[in-house]
Image (cartoon, rainbow, N blue to C red):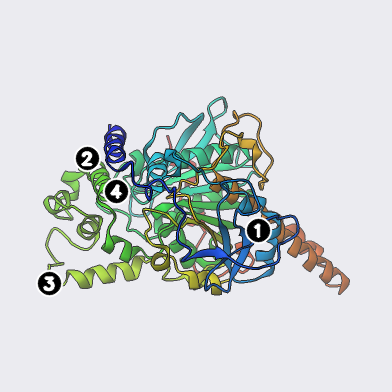
Amino acid sequence: MLEWLVALCVVVLVVIIWPGSKLFGTESLPDAVLHKADMSRPPGKTGCVSGLEGCDGALPVCDGTGTEKGASTVALICKPSALANYLLNNCRTFSNYTACVGWTWRTSAFLQSVYEACWPYDSPVQFVRDNLQLGDDGLVALDWAVPSYQKRRRTSSHSSSPVLLIIPNSFGRITRNVLELCETALSHGYLPAVFNRRSHNGTPLTTVKLQQFGDPSDLREAVRYIRYRQPAGRLYAVSESTGSGLLLSYLGECGSSSYVTAAVCLSPVFRCQSWFENGLCWPLQWALVLYQKICLSRYRTVLGEAIHTDTLFSSCSLRSLEEVLFCQTASGSSSSSNSPAAWDAYWERNEPLRDVDEVAIPVLSVCAQDDPVRGEIQSTVPLELFETNPHFFLLLTDRGGHCGFSTEGSSTGVFGAAGSAAAPNSGLVGRGTNWSHRALLEFFRATTDFFAAEERAKQLAARRRGLGGGVGGRAFRHRSVSTCKRMPVCSHNIHAIYNWQRSYTR
């Protein structure tokens, strides 16, 4: 019902502001961020001469001038390194982005964002849920995606297939984008698992505690379970929209003990405190606030023991909702006089980039300049992070909306992707694949191949020195890149904490 209500509002908005050329992207974007640069073209990449104004770390990807009509400007922004050069030379999807043009709704950043978030999707994928009981008796859920034709609903723990951990947005909405990603990942041999926070997506709320925006403690325990269930497979992670705050918090807090090989953030929100404070345009703000109230209304009685529910359900902004949920109590210990101090203290604990220097794996962020949810790129994207930190890469397009990235000729099959870290599975019916999904799978493949080649080179050098590097090679074969340096930040002694033989699953 909520989807159709949002769709009706969108139709009314379109009828009112259809003549606006700005909404439908018929006029070119200002060159405040992306512009042409006289750079030598890499071999095999015709017309790839774009750069980023004022960014020393911008590497050429594609500006669309030497390609087919409608090709968009794409820039890879990062600190120059061997891995960056390897990605640029081996990730063909990065330079193969052709945005929709003309008077079609897919050229609108707003409409394609709403479409990916709200429009129903007839997915051939089914989900098998594992409810995980946490140390404080709370519950989170992992939804394992399986093809609808598969008779055996459980995957063997001896499988060496890579696991793709998907973190949806912080509001708990399973979007069309997430379902499409699960389908694409399955077709490329991954085992997708969707992480659901407390009370999200039908997960029972068994405690009065909700998960704070950037608190990775629940996610850490879910990763422990994944490593216990699939010990032989590599673990990759993808986050969507505001869910990137949780992923970045986890990677920063756990550092080299994250057990994740590589990660991708799709249309992330980086500066989350200012994002909540500044707010969104009223249609998006109203829809998100309404959705959160609907989800929380079923727990109104139990939540009344910890927070002011009357204030909660009378809130009109995302910030006020977040403040009531996490900065105030039913006893009123956080009064209006010190509410700003409580709000700032909350974000000191939950800001996604608070431990960003501890991230020890490659992280790719896919963003569009016209993202209507994140806001103006120059004030919302920390470009200096990508210029100085060798672990962070920003793939920036001029158009694409929020988790949209609609392309011309999107009817091509799922198997048209340029590559993946696993062999394709022919069981699923081919569909058009989102460009960002092809890009992230190619990023995973490229980073895995790069570090495997680096490891082989180290082993060869060790053998030449007579140090016996062959043994280390066998040990590395099924280990995450991030576990080469073990640091006692996160304990993973799973048998000392849980007895998964009596796991809470259904």
From the image, state whether disc 4 or disc 1 is nearer to you. 1
From the viewer's perspective, is 11 left or right of 477?
A: left
Callout 4 crowding tier (Cα within 10 Å): few <14, some 14–19, many ≥20 = some
Q: What's the amino acid at mark 2?
A: Arg
Which quadrant of the structure image shows residue 380? bottom left
Where is residue 215? Give x, y as percent: 37, 61
Q: Which mark is residue 298?
A: 2
Q: Are marks 4 and 3 in contact (CB under 8 Å)?
A: no
Q: Depth check: 70 or 321 in front?
A: 70
C-alpha gap between disc 2 and disc 1: 53 Å
Q: Earlier in the sequence, mark 4 or mark 3?
A: 4
C-alpha gap between disc 4 and disc 3: 30 Å
According to the image, label 4 marks what residue?
Answer: 284
Q: Are marks 2 and 1 in contact (CB under 8 Å)?
A: no
Q: Residue at x 39, y 55 (%)?
A: 242
Q: Which mark is residue 48?
A: 1
According to the image, label 3 marks what residue?
Answer: 337
